Image (spheres, rainbow, N blue to C red):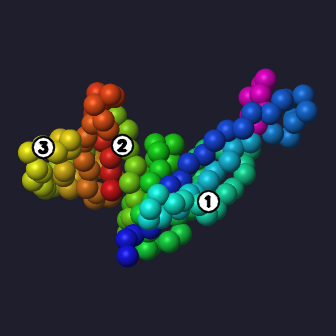
Amino acid sequence: MTTPLKIIDSSTLPLTLTNHKWAEFRKTKSGVKLHLRLVFMEKGLSYPDKAVLTNANEHDRGQLEVFVDDKECMYVFDRGYLDYGRFDQMTEDGYFFVTRLRKNAVVRVLESFSLPEDSPVFSDEMVVIVHHKIVLKTCFAYSNCMIQKEMSFIY
């Protein structure tokens, strides 16, 4: 049995300000945000597991506590959910997750791990994110040859 993978993301659904004043999030716009958790299973199957509708001005990271509730799975979410303090608590509580680091994140390497010579991963390291007590593994990799961009992930 493999560890379940749950992906958390959101999409803003624009609405006309004239008809939806209750959903105003800018002077000239209104909208709602759909926060969604998808469960990915074997053989490429997936299904929506949880959904929350908020005003469009709700920040994604405010939904982490709602969506991260199962210690038996791996969560994946984008930088909109970055909250290093909350990551500290999630790590201490035994949750597993993957997300990208900010470009300006300052890390201190605790240990480096060896990689196969033909690996697309540049490095695999145990790090501490400076200014936070969180200890995480991070890897730097090209996502594919078309993008030609280095990305940092924490897990």
Q: Can I make out residue 122 in this image? A: yes
Residues at marks 3 and 2, CA–CA distance in whole angstroms: 24 Å
Q: Name the kind of residue labelled 2 in the image.
A: Leu
Q: Where residue 75 sits: x, y (%)?
A: 45, 59
Q: Earlier in the sequence, mark 3 or mark 1?
A: 1
Callout 2 touching callout 1 (CB < 8 Å):
no
In the rendered image, the residue lying farthest to the right is: 19
Give the numbered dot on residue 118: 3
- Bounds of the magenta span? 24-31
Quadrant location of the C terminus in the rendered image = bottom left
Q: Is 123 on the left-hand or right-hand side of 33?
A: left
> How dense is the environment of label 1, judged by Cα within 10 Å: few (below 14), some, or many (20 and up)?
few
- The residue at which mark 2 appears reads as 101
Pick the residue in front: 145 or 86: 145
In the rendered image, the residue lying farthest to the front is: 43
Q: Where residue 1 sits: x, y (%)?
A: 37, 76
Residues at marks 2 and 1, CA–CA distance in whole angstroms: 26 Å
Per the picture, the main secondary structure of the magenta-coloured stretch is strand
Pick the residue in front: 56 or 27: 56
Q: Dot 1: what SS?
A: strand
Residues at marks 3 and 1, CA–CA distance in whole angstroms: 36 Å
- The residue at which mark 1 appears reads as 48
> How dense is the environment of label 3, judged by Cα within 10 Å: few (below 14), some, or many (20 and up)?
few
Q: Which label lies toward us, 3 or 2?
A: 3
Q: Name the kind of residue labelled 1 in the image.
A: Pro
Pick the residue in front: 66 or 106: 66
Q: Residue at x 72, y 38 (%)?
A: 13
* Quadrant of the rendered image containing residue 26: top right
* Quadrant of the rendered image containing residue 3: bottom left
Q: Dot 2: what SS?
A: loop
